Image: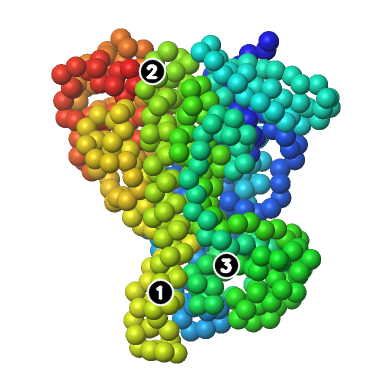
């Protein structure tokens, strides 16, 4: 039986990104994907700063930026308007746009299908990766020795084939067969609203929205819809748009008049348009209770699915990839223990569970409460004051700072794993490492490598002790030495141990009493 180290079920952006992450480290990985062509619906467009750091690590960030459809430098962000986009009440939320200094890459915007195309090209450049199309997986099995994936192909649909792997990862979407067959349950919040996704062309809408500063999305809060968003998003400047909005349950794709009426109401003006696609989705939030069962893992929409609010779908899936990829590599390479694999679910599951409730559902609830409480007709002065104090928008809030303080593979975290925090330059165990410039003028992130990295600022002797412990425990480690001055002072420590996903594993000013114990702890042994 043909065997791989990892088989990934699902070749969307999350599945292919995971394959890239693994194959760059030499892992023999196979991706099984049912569809031969990339879907052309322009979803998953907002890529946060952190996601662009991933693409830099995967060696294709320039290619990703070149694939954008909007002009370079076009402002990314949104306008929020009251009742429609013709009124006097609107604002420009900042959200995470103000957090850019804490990341090594700027954010980006492009349709998901363009992102997928870039990832597929990158995967094709890596020798240890294989991507097979026209494959439908029918079963996933596991035992103590490994896993087996059963599937049929488009060419021979009546003959079941079997492949083996050390591990399987389900990146097969919200209806994940891998999740279901692994017996993983989900918790859900159903907001009981059918939503339309319309893709259309309309130069007239572009001309109308010139009344606002240039932005990529335009969101409407209408009291008639109790906090459920209506919003337009740009795909191609001046031409193509998408629209999301609530519709009656009986609405079908043939009801273009009803959909256009809703779009006109949101815009506050009638405009001509030509529909390219009409689809529907349910306003609900689902999160898996765990992301690992033995040798089987899930990632992306197989773990968590939700409304396309805040740019939190694809970005969250890509963060799953960066968290899981190095842990599988470590386990396969013999320097990561079972506790390291457990930490994937322990770190990532609480992040989305909190994101779903405290960000996405909270947006709907808070907007509904605001619209019920304040009205420009009922009390114009009270409404103006309350509206002027609003900062929420279509991007994650400024306090959104996922961290793993309570993780078993973080030393010195001493807190909780969660999403509420504060972006800082200080290196904190369990938190994302902020960028800095080295005295050579180089970007620190470019020097970190694929494995662990030890930042040593005027600490050569201490670095040698930890490097020796890494060699003794088989942990791949690169040491980045520099002076403890300028930007490096902001880290607040002379020694910073950085995980392969660029989160801080440990920090200090002197080596720990048991350096080998430190290396074993951060690799789950």
145, above or below 443, in the image = above
* Label 3 crowd bin: few (<14), some (14–19), many (20+), radius 10 Å: many
> Residue 231: which disc?
3
* Label 2 crowd bin: few (<14), some (14–19), many (20+), radius 10 Å: some
34, above or below 295, in the image = below
Label 2: which secondary element: loop
Label 3: which secondary element: strand
Q: Quadrant of residue 137?
A: top right
* Label 1 crowd bin: few (<14), some (14–19), many (20+), radius 10 Å: some
> Residue 337: which disc?
2
Label 1: which secondary element: helix
Give the image location of residue 156, x and y in percent: 83, 25
Whether residue 521 sits left or right of residue 177 in the image: it is left
> Residue 370: which disc?
1
Give the image location of residue 79, x and y in percent: 50, 70
Whether residue 113 sits left or right of residue 364 in the image: it is right
Asked whether the viewer can see residue 447, the reply is no
250, above or below 503, in the image = below
Q: Quadrant of the C terminus?
A: top left
**Closer to the N terminus: mark 1 or mark 3?**
3
Q: Which mark's residue is nearer the viewer, 2 or 1?
A: 1
Q: CA distance from mark 1 to mark 3?
A: 18 Å
């Amino acid at each position: 039986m043909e065997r791989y180290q990892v088989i990934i079920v699902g070749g969307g952006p999350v599945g292919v990104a995971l394959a890239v992450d693994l194959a760059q480290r030499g892992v023999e990985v196979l991706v099984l994907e049912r569809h031969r062509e990339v879907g052309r619906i322009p979803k998953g467009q907002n890529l946060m700063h952190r996601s662009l750091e991933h693409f830099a690590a995967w060696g294709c960030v320039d290619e990703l930026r070149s694939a954008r459809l909007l002009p370079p430098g076009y402002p990314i962000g949104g306008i929020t308007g009251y009742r429609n986009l013709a009124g006097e009440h609107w604002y420009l939320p900042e959200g995470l746009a103000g957090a850019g200094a804490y990341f090594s890459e700027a954010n980006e915007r492009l349709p998901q299908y363009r992102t997928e195309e870039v990832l597929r090209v990158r995967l094709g450049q890596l020798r240890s990766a294989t991507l097979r199309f026209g494959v439908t997986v029918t079963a996933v099995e596991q035992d103590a020795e490994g896993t087996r994936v059963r599937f049929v192909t488009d060419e021979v649909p009546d003959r079941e084939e079997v492949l083996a792997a050390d591990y399987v990862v389900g990146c097969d979407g919200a209806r994940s067969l891998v999740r279901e067959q692994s017996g993983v349950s989900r918790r859900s919040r159903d907001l009981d609203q059918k939503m339309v996704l319309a893709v259309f062309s309309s130069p007239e809408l572009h001309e109308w929205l010139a009344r606002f500063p240039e932005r990529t999305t335009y969101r409407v809060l209408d009291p008639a819809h109790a906090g459920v968003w209506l919003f337009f998003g740009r795909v191609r400047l001046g031409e193509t748009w998408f629209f999301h909005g609530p519709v009656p349950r009986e609405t079908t794709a043939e009801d273009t008049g009803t959909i256009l009426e809703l779009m006109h109401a949101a815009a506050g003006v009638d405009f001509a348009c030509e529909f390219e696609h009409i689809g529907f989705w349910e306003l609900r939030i689902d999160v898996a209770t765990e992301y690992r069962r033995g040798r089987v893992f899930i990632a992306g929409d197989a773990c968590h699915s939700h409304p396309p609010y805040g740019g939190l779908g694809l970005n969250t899936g890509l963060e799953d990839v960066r968290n899981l990829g190095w842990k599988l590599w470590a386990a396969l390479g013999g320097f990561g223990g079972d506790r390291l694999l457990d930490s994937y679910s322990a770190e990532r599951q609480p992040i989305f569970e909190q994101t779903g409730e405290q960000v996405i559902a909270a947006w709907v609830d808070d907007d509904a409460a605001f619209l019920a409480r304040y009205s420009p007709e009922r009390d114009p002065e009270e409404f103006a004051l309350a509206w002027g104090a609003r900062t929420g928008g279509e991007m994650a809030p400024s306090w959104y700072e996922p961290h793993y303080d309570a993780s078993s593979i973080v030393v010195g975290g001493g807190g909780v794993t969660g999403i509420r925090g504060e972006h800082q330059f200080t290196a904190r165990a369990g938190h994302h490492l902020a960028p800095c410039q080295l005295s050579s003028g180089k970007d620190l992130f470019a020097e970190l490598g694929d494995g662990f990295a030890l930042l040593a600022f005027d600490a050569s002797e201490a670095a040698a002790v930890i490097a020796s412990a890494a060699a003794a425990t088989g942990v791949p480690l690169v040491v980045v030495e520099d002076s403890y001055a300028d930007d490096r002072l902001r880290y607040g420590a002379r020694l910073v141990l950085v995980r392969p996903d660029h989160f801080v594993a440990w920090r200090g000013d002197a080596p720990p009493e048991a350096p080998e114990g430190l290396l074993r702890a951060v690799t789950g042994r």
